[in-house]
Image: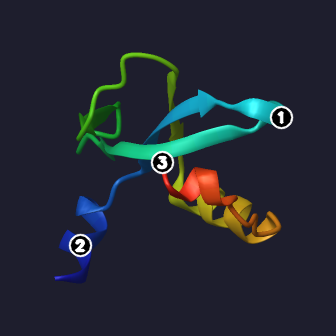
């Protein structure tokens, strides 16, 4: 059972990235990329298709490390109400 779960895990998470004010980028998860059995490529499954910005693929470890290294940012009231 463990081997099957390992095979079904995505190699990358797909994010729609939009540039915001103050040189900040905002990441929204839109899908994942799964490796082919032969190891020669990936299949990307998208839950949403952005019409602007860009799609970035990140390994789960990269994103987790980035989140741990960044200082938590308190959102302003107007950002929370959007």
Sequence-first tag of 2 and 3: 2
What x and y, as percent, mark residue 60?
52, 59
> Residue furthest toward the top?
52
Residue 56 horizontal/vertical position (percent): 53, 33
Along the line of sight, the residue nearer the viewer: 82 or 57: 82
The residues bearing labels 3 and 1 have C-alpha atoms spaced at a distance of 18 Å
The dot on residue 5 is 2
Q: What element carries label 1?
A: helix
Q: Position of residue 23 (x, y in %)?
A: 81, 32
Q: What element carries label 2?
A: helix
The residue at the point 35 percent across, 54 percent down is: 10
What residue lies at 73% left-to-right and 67% top-to-bottom? 74
In whole angstroms, how far apart are the C-alphas of marks 1 and 2? 40 Å
Q: In this view, does 1 lie above or below 8?
A: below
Which residue position holds label 1?
A: 22
What residue is disc 3 on?
A: 82
Graded by Cα atoms within 10 Å as few (under 14), some (14 to 19) or many (20 or more), the crowding at tag 1 reads: few
Q: Are marks 2 and 3 in contact (CB under 8 Å)?
A: no
């Amino acid at each position: 059972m463990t081997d099957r779960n390992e095979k079904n895990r995505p190699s990358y998470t797909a994010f729609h990235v939009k540039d915001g004010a103050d040189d900040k980028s905002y990441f929204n998860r839109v899908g994942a990329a799964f490796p082919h059995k032969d190891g020669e490529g990936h299949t990307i499954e998208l839950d949403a298709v952005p019409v602007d910005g860009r799609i970035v693929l990140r390994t789960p470890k990269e994103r987790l490390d980035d989140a741990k290294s960044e200082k938590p940012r308190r959102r302003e009231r107007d950002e929370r109400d959007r």
